[in-house]
Amino acid sequence: MRRVWGILLVIIATVILPLVIGCGEKGVPDDAATLTLKKVYSWKTNEDFFALTNCFIYNSADSKNPMNGMVKLGKIWVIATRMGSVERVEIIKKFNDGNTANVMYSLYFKDGTTIQSNTALLIKIDGVWKLTVN
């Protein structure tokens, strides 16, 4: 009986387990929207803050007063620098219809801090993906 269970366990470990682990989005290559999101978070303190703002689009209230959007970006930057630079961005789930993309992701900072399950909305404008700021 032990031998039967042993053989069954080997079959599960070699055939079924890789199929279960292989399901999901982790093996899907990054699309342009996801790469834009990662580019935003790979920005370092020595890079030009205003160049980074070209990667964002502001909501309708902020589009009337761009300084509101800049203040929001500044707050994001303060939070990020407090935790250290972003070490990696893990994409958990994504939906991309070609013009808009919703991406669920987690951020891992160099100081060991993690921010889990953020959601980003990206919009494609004139062929360029931009991250929305709300």
Image (cartoon, helix red, strand yellow):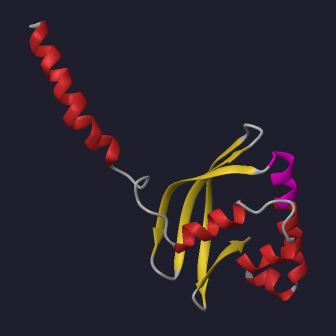
Residue 97 in magenta stretch:
no
Specify whether 36 is left or right of 56: left
Residue 43 to residue 7: above or below: below
Looking at the image, which residue sits at the far top?
2
Is residue 72 among what the camera can see? yes
Residue 75 to residue 21: above or below: below
Between 114 and 71, the one lying in front of the other is: 114
Residue 82 in magenta stretch:
yes
- Residue 134 in the image, given as x and y percentages of width and height: 74, 70
Residue at the image position 81 percent from the left and 45 percent from the top: 83
Between 89 and 94, the one lying in front of the other is: 89
- Residue 82 in the image, given as x and y percentages of width and height: 86, 47
Specify whether 19 is left or right of 39: left
Residue 96 to residue 60: above or below: above
Specify whether 35 is left or right of 98: right
Residue at the image position 81 percent from the left and 77 percent from the top: 51
The N terminus - image quarter: top left
Residue at the image position 63 percent from the left and 62 percent from the top: 38
Is residue 58 among what the camera can see? no
Residue 77 to residue 10: above or below: below
Between 59 and 40, the one lying in front of the other is: 40
Specify whether 73 is left or right of 120: right
- Residue 8 in the image, given as x and y percentages of width and height: 14, 22
Residue at the image position 41 percent from the left and 55 percent from the top: 25
Looking at the image, which residue sits at the far front?
46
Give the magenta-colored segment's residue range.
77-84
Classify residue 52 by image quadrant.
Answer: bottom right
